[in-house]
Image: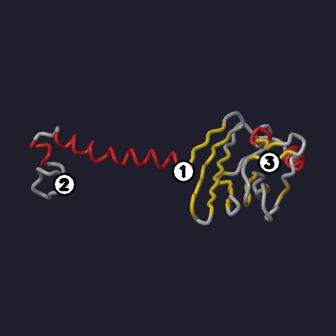
Amino acid sequence: MANYYSFMVTEKSFQVENSEAFEEEMRKLGIVPDNWDGGLTFVKEMDGSYWVGGYDCDLSIWSEEKGDYIDVVPFIQKHMRSDTIWVVKHVGHEKLCYVTGWTGVITKHRCKYGDLDRLARGLEKRILLQPKRTIMLLQQQTPQQAESIPNSKNSVRGKW
């Protein structure tokens, strides 16, 4: 995907136990603060919390030493305070097609992800099933109950 563009943003910044240790670890991984030229970066907010994101990046970085990508989440979790939650979002596209996206909710000990495709499929199913469920519920109503529903098929107030 030569024309794939993406960005990742922190929606909810997180607190760390020791700022100096966290920043040193990030620099060792090659993640530098306030780097807006592409790649993963971090910013220390005014309240001491951290924002992590960037252009054309993800939560993994290339390791020359390992010859593979490494996940940065465990490195960040190691420094997070136990009472903080980090929420991150990522979206990307290729020529404004093939849009992808996910969000992650990360704590010191847990990490959960959800992607746009799975969300869309779930919503499709809910929407397709909802009219059938509504009709079934209306069919189970007595004429007196149906009369009290503003837009039911048996209501004198309206038809649908």
The residue at 26%/44% (across/down) is 132
- Graded by Cα atoms within 10 Å as few (under 14), some (14 to 19) or many (20 or more), the crowding at tag 3 reads some
Label 2 neighbourhood size at 10 Å, few (<14), some (14-19), many (20+)? Answer: some
Give whichever of discs 3 and 2 has the lower sequence position.
Answer: 3
Which quadrant is the N terminus positioned in? bottom right
Q: Quadrant of residue 106?
A: top right
Q: Is residue 76 left or right of residue 138?
A: right
The residue type indicated by label 3 comes to Ile
Q: Please name the residue that numbered disc 2 is placed on.
A: 151
Q: Residue at x 18, y 49 (%)?
A: 149
Amino acid marked by disc 1: Leu
User: Dot 1 corresponds to which residue?
Assistant: 116
* Viewer-side label of 1, 2: 1
Residue closest to the eye, 55 or 27: 55
Determine which residue is flagged by label 3.
Answer: 61
Residue type at numbered disc 2: Asn
